[in-house]
Image (cartoon, grey):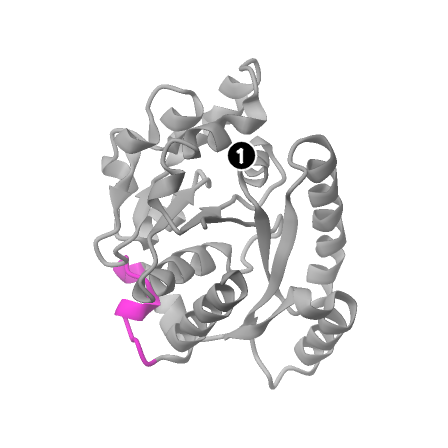
């Protein structure tokens, strides 16, 4: 059965794109068929997958406007071995152009239905904003993964995001749920990080993934080479953490 996850947090720099790329590669490593959708105009998930966003003829922008089907737009991440719906700066104009379109919040959902049977997992890397692109991701998803750093302001923003998810569930997508909160860039030597982590577990219980993504130099380096960390340093703490996360998700899905 297919699993469709929106990876989102309106706060930037919390590891959404890093998680999208490395979770996709780790699921493929475990034998799963994976599609990654880049919904961020910055195109970082595209570049981090080894695809040059500057050379693209068609992107998710053309899918959202109904100009191209997903089958025409998807490419293969050579290093990651997963399929990718890429993005570049063209996507920044999509919000304005979609305003007058019918079912503007469900454009991605409709497009994904044409290829859904070909995959075990579809992951969507959402932009760090609660905009129409993110809304398309939330409407297409079955569940939401929220990467977050264990710091005070992360807790502040989390309540806003949870309220947004509730509103999307009521108005657009009744099956949407929070799959889990993922602690990223975690440093166990940081007292505040440990305190915030404890608060998350007390408040959200089993909604907090057991797997914790550590602060890791190999994870930071990998995008510069256009590869998931699994193919940069497979034995690094970052690579092992994302392999563990993939196993945790698969076990919960089985």
Q: Where is residue 171? Give x, y as percent.
A: 71, 31
Q: Residue at x 25, y 29 (%)?
A: 57
Q: Tell me if 43 is positioned left or right of 147 in this view.
A: left
Q: Is residue 182 above or below residue 158?
A: below
**SS label for mark 1:** helix
- On screen, residue 233 versus residue 153, left or right, reads left
Q: Is residue 149 above or below residue 80?
A: below
Bounds of the magenta segment: 224-235
Residue sticking out furthest to the bottom = 189
The answer to if 98 sits in the magenta stretch is no
- Residue 174: quadrant of the picture: top right
The residue carrying mark 1 is: 133
Q: In front here: 82 or 212?
A: 82
Q: Position of residue 225 (x, y in %)?
A: 26, 61
Whether residue 30 sits left or right of residue 213 in the image: it is left
Q: Position of residue 220 (x, y in %)?
A: 40, 67
> Closer to the camera, 237 or 151?
237
Residue 129 falls in image quadrant = top right
The residue under the point 53% across, 34% down is 133
Quarter holding residue 241: bottom left
Q: Position of residue 67 (x, y in %)?
A: 35, 19
Query: In this image, 84 relative to 109: left or right?
Result: left
- Asked if the stretch drawn in magenta spans residue 234, the answer is yes
- Total number of numbered labels? 1
As rendered, which of 201 and 14 lies closer to the eye?
201
Mark 1 burial class by Cα count in 10 Å: few <14, some 14-19, many 20+: many
């Amino acid at each position: 059965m297919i699993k469709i996850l929106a990876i989102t947090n309106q706060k930037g720099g919390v590891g959404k794109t890093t998680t999208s790329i490395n979770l996709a590669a780790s699921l493929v490593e475990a034998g799963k068929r994976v599609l990654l959708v880049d919904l961020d105009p910055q195109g970082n998930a595209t570049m981090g997958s080894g695809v040059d966003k500057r050379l693209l003829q068609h992107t998710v922008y053309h899918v959202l406007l109904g100009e191209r089907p997903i089958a025409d737009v998807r490419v293969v991440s050579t290093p990651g071995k997963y399929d990718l719906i890429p993005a570049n700066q063209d996507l920044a104009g999509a919000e304005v152009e979609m305003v007058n379109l019918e079912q503007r919040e469900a454009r991605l959902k409709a497009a994904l239905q044409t290829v859904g049977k070909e995959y075990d997992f579809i992951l969507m890397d959402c932009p760090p904003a609660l905009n129409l692109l993110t809304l398309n991701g939330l409407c297409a998803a079955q569940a939401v993964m929220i990467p977050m750093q264990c710091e005070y302001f992360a807790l502040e923003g989390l309540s806003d995001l949870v309220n947004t998810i509730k509103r999307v569930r009521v108005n657009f997508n009744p099956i949407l749920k929070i799959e889990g909160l993922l602690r990223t860039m975690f440093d166990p030597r940081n007292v505040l990080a440990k305190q915030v982590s404890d608060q998350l577990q007390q408040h959200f219980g089993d909604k907090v993934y057991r797997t914790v993504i550590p602060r890791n130099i190999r994870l930071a380096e990998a995008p510069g080479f256009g590869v998931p960390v699994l193919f940069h340093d497979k034995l690094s703490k970052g690579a092992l953490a994302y392999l563990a996360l993939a196993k945790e998700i698969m076990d919960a899905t089985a």
